[in-house]
Image: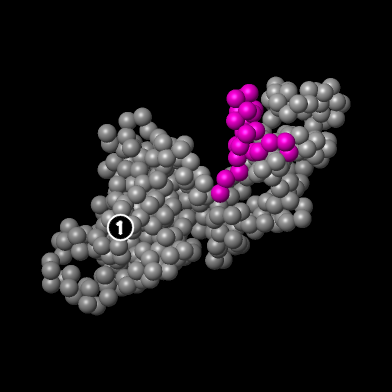
Amino acid sequence: MKLPLHGIRVLDLSNVLAGPFCGYQLSLMGAEVIKIEVPGEGDLARRLGADPQAAARRMGASFVAVNAGKQSVTLNLKDPRGREILMRMVGESDVLLENFRPGVMDRLELSYDVLKAINPRIVYCAISGFGKDGPLADRPAYDQIIQGMSGAMSVTGDEHSAPLRVGFPISDTVGGITAAFAIAAALVDAVRTGAGRMIDVSMLESTLAAMGWVVSNFLNAGVKPAPMGNQNFTAAPSGTFRTGDGLINIAANEDKQFASLCRIVGHPEWLGDPRFNDRHARKTHRTELTGALEAALASRSAAAWEQELVDAGVPAGLVLDVPAILAHEQIETRRFVTRFDEEGQSVTRAGFRLSDAEVAPQSPAPRLAQHTRAWLERLGYDASAIETLHTEGVV
């Protein structure tokens, strides 16, 4: 069956993570995504990742993570001939995605207004750290910067370790997902009306939007969010707890779940304890409850407690590292990892399933410039012209 974005063509001019992650999501949904890269260099992510040899080949692990299923075309957009090729591609495309600093595309004479004149249906999405306007618009931004400025670091860790960076580039990732959602929505309207639009994605605002609960607690209840480590600020006992062997997450957020937990750990008397017999009382006396619960959990391993708690309807799960969860039968059963053995690439698929189609990359991440000649030929350039463009560094 065809995927929802089958027939949609995306020109992905972005680099490193936020933009490429957005393009990857669109590719997984069936869009044809053509990655436009700098001749000879390509996306910086090609040189990033834990495998130095792969990075030296311009196929770094960081690049592979979010570029499977795409094509690679190299164009020098500082050369008028390179811009002409891109504009011809825009005429045959539905989306242009970029994550340059605001103003770069204007200086290249490739602004939304210019491209809209070529293709009124084009959906133009620009991802930047702070958006196209405002006093910080011209600042360069990386995930670390946005995590710090957004308040995400201020609520990560505990009173001793905060502010702490989230352990993966969450602001880049959320920015990419936000852009993919906005593009998909704009495409629906473009198909319906024949008119595209400009989308201005701010990584700062995307991150703040994703922090909805803690932001709302301040806006609507006047409570300044505080770092609580592995505890859940909405309920108790809800967080990470030590056992006789290993850590376990327990989320006994409802009264009936707490009652089951008390029974399982052998302390039904907690239900009559005024410190613990009410949802708000448990939050107030979180420290005492955590100490008592960990003392009870010390008699068995995390794995043993997990099964018994889950069987009783108490949400619980082991605290795993990345290798452990990737090897877990749940992940393997749902074929979350796609492997391209000939290229030595393993990539993750989308975080959802469709009832009638496979949402997984159809090809490995492309080699730099792998599809340039094919596209030039498609656009009408003959062998001599292509050789000249290559020799003169345009492609």
Q: x%, y% of residue 275?
A: 85, 30
Circle 1 residue? 343
Residue 32 visible (yes or no): yes
Amino acid on which the number 1 mark rests in the picture: Glu
In the image, the segment drawn in magenta is: 297-321
Report the quarter where the C terminus lies: bottom left
Report the quarter where the N terminus lies: top left
Against 138, residue 211 (above or below) is above
Residue 106 visible (yes or no): no
Against 95, residue 374 (above or below) is below
Q: Residue at x 32, y 30 (%)?
A: 356
305 in the magenta segment: yes
Against 302, residue 275 (above or below) is above
Q: x%, y% of residue 330?
A: 47, 36
Q: Residue at x 52, y 49 (%)?
A: 322
Q: x%, y% of residue 152?
A: 65, 52
Q: Quadrant of residue 107?
A: bottom left
Viewer-proximal residue among 214 and 331: 331
Q: x%, y% of residue 138?
A: 55, 65
Would you say 295 lies left or right of 68 here? right
Q: Secondary structure at mark 1?
A: loop
